[in-house]
Amino acid sequence: MCWYKLLKYKVELCCGLLCIVVLASCRPNVRESSVANRYFNLKTFINADSARLNKLPLTVIKTVRHNNDVAQTKELQIKNWGQELAPFSASDINKPAWKDSYSIINKADSVVYAALEDDLVTRRMVIYRAGEKVKRIKINNYTKNLLYQTTEQLDYYPDSLYSIDKLQKVRFLGSNRYIISGKIKQALK
């Protein structure tokens, strides 16, 4: 009977140590989240610009076109710029797992980020600058799987224009193309 208690004690001790090891390995790696951004921080830029635009008295002439049908155009005020520009912030490439996944080409007036791996959605991003000020952001996204293929071209000119050109080919259902553009202008007082 003594050997049974000793064996039970050893099993309980091993299970306890195993639980401690498993729980310790589940804690997040703090160093990984504090790594400086290697690429242009698109998400932070779009969030800051959205907050700035939310405070301004702006109207937008927004045009939506589906499959080259007649375009619908409306002049409206955007209540939530973060939501309006969400496709841009969703294209942010600053993820710790992608720190070496893009090439960086610095030019006099721009920085080009190009994907080095075929499975990355954001294939190319170009940030055009005048000094330290961002003048234009151009993004090419591409997704392909067994069911669909999506190509997306995003353009953003702070304070003047944004456009989203999306072509989606769905197996057995055909293609859909959406073109959304918004011309930003000061609201009349």
Image (tube, rainbow, N blue to C red):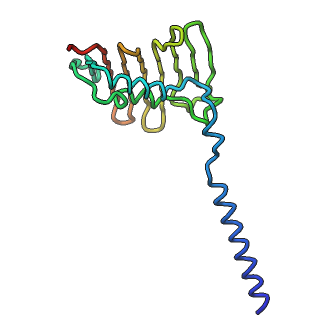
Q: Farthest right residue?
A: 3
In the rendered image of this protein, does residue 124 appear above or below residue 80?
Answer: above
In the rendered image of this protein, does residue 61 appear above or below residue 19?
Answer: above
The residue depicted at 49 percent of the width and 28 percent of the height is 44
Of 75 and 171, nearer the camera is: 75
Q: Position of residue 129 (x, y in %)?
A: 51, 11
Viewport quadrant of the N terminus: bottom right
Q: Position of residue 98 (x, y in %)?
A: 61, 33
Q: Position of residue 74 (x, y in %)?
A: 21, 20
Tell me if 1 is positioned left or right of 68 in this view: right
Tell me if 133 is positioned left or right of 179 in this view: right
Q: Quadrant of residue 119?
A: top right
Of 160 and 97, nearer the camera is: 160
Q: Position of residue 117 (x, y in %)?
A: 61, 29
Of 113 and 94, nearer the camera is: 94
For the image, the number of numbered tags is 0
The residue depicted at 62 percent of the width and 15 percent of the height is 105
Viewport quadrant of the C terminus: top left
Q: Quadrant of residue 112?
A: top right
The residue depicted at 74 percent of the width and 86 percent of the height is 5
Q: Quadrant of residue 21?
A: bottom right
